[in-house]
Image (cartoon, helix red, strand yellow):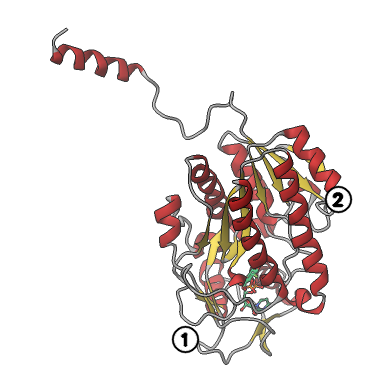
Amino acid sequence: MNITFRWLFVLSFCMTLKPIQSQEDPSMNLRILVTGGAGYIGSHVCYYLKEQGFEPVTFDNFSTGHREAVRFGSLVEGDLLNPEHINQAIQKYNPIAVMHLASFIQVGESVKDPLKYYQNNNVGMINLLNAMKNHHVPYMIFSSSAAVYGNPTYTPLDEDHPCYPINPYGQTKWMIEQMLKDCDKAYGLKSVSLRYFNAAGAAPEQNLGEAHEPESHLIPLMIKAAQKGDAGKPLKIFGRDYSTRDGTCLRDYIHILDLADAHLKALSYLRGGGETLSVNLGSGHGTTNFEMIQKIKELFGVDVPFEYADRREGDPAVLVSTYEKAEKVLGWTPQRPIETVLTDAWKWHQTEK
Ligand code: UFG
């Protein structure tokens, strides 16, 4: 075969190959244990994993999760505070990775009852890491938070900003990031800590959305107040004297499906030999609390009944992040703007009973 002919042969062989699919080969073990899979972010992550050809296994104690949200794979009802539960789950399902989202998340409560947070978030994590070590699970994607930074000294935040958490919730996340670095050094367990900014939005077609008990997050409270009109309680906007463009706090909202996508990209990064690291998931843009109310009016023609109230303890004025590191290392960029976040959340709340 001369050279030209050989190339033609190779080319024609390549043309008979199927294009590369985004989904992975289903014959491989693509089982992922998702702790907190019944929660707001966890259930969207499970949906997304399933969509992409993985097999999510939810591990949840239903302290705050929703049974009806576990629809995308198997369920283990168990508690991370019981080492037997998590050891048995990992032994039975033999996952290639753990996505760890189970945690208490209320900043205010963590200030009032810090031990509840250290016990649940940190002791639970130690049990989980021991189980992973015992059964040689090599990768973890950890749900960290913008709360690790404390009060920003500059914005937008990047990962070089010093971390001085200002509440026990943020401390638990920061301490876990340190545990993960040590576990890499000692046991070779590789991890990505995803520092979420404001997770928001919904997957209304999947009947998945944001509901906490008690509800403390701005978007669900704002939409409920708008959709229930006068029958609903007016929204309280906490603080109007911050140094922002209209005096109300500024936040960086990331669509929940963009967050879910980051989990998969982080896993691909680790499976491709990536090193342990922490990365921000933000959009580079902020919206103030007052602008959120205006956007609801623009998008849906409905007023949000609201009143101003005192500042809420522990609220930084501005939390906005760059996504340069996430783009460079994970190939992740946020795809859905704040309008999509609000439209999806609005649609889901319309169907919520
Ligand atoms: N807000 C109101 N009224 C409300 C609820 C919230 O004005 O009834 C304001 C808050 O003061 C804040 C903004 O809306 O300015 C967003 O508040 P959320 O409670 O929705 O979200 P946070 O920014 O407080 O929390 C997020 C994550 C936490 C994480 C924190 C980091 O949800 O998990 O960022 O500071 F810890």
| Amino acid type, mark 1 | Arg
Q: Is residue 316 left or right of residue 221?
A: left
Residue farthest top in this picture: 1
**Label 1 element class:** loop
Which residue is at a point 63% across and 88% down the rendered structure image? Answer: 239
Q: Is residue 332 left or right of residue 223?
A: left
Which residue is at a point 62% across and 71% down the rendered structure image? Answer: 147
Image height check: is 123 above or below 42? below
Q: Give the Cα distance between marks 2 and 1.
A: 48 Å
User: Number of callouts in the render?
Assistant: 2
Residue farthest front in this picture: 186
Residue 156 on image: x %, y %: 45, 74
Residue 310 visible (yes or no): yes
Residue 256 on image: x %, y %: 58, 56
Q: Earlier in the sequence, mark 2 or mark 1?
A: 2
Beta carbon of the mark 1 residue lies under 8 A of ligand 1: no
Image height check: is 314 above or below 56? below
**Label 2 element class:** loop
The label number, if any, that marks residue 201 in the structure image: none
The residue to which callout 2 is attached is 82
Quadrant in which the N terminus is drawn: top left
Residue 231 visible (yes or no): no
Decide: marks 2, 1 in contact (CB < 8 A)?
no
Q: Quadrant of residue 194?
A: bottom right
Crowd band around label 2 with a 10 angstrom C-alpha radius: few (<14), some (14–19), many (20+): few
The residue to which callout 1 is attached is 245
Q: Nearer the viewer, residue 350 or 150?
A: 150
Residue 166 on image: x %, y %: 65, 79
Quadrant in which the C terminus is drawn: bottom right
Which residue is at a point 42% across and 50% down the rendered structure image? Answer: 331
Q: Quadrant of residue 211?
A: bottom right
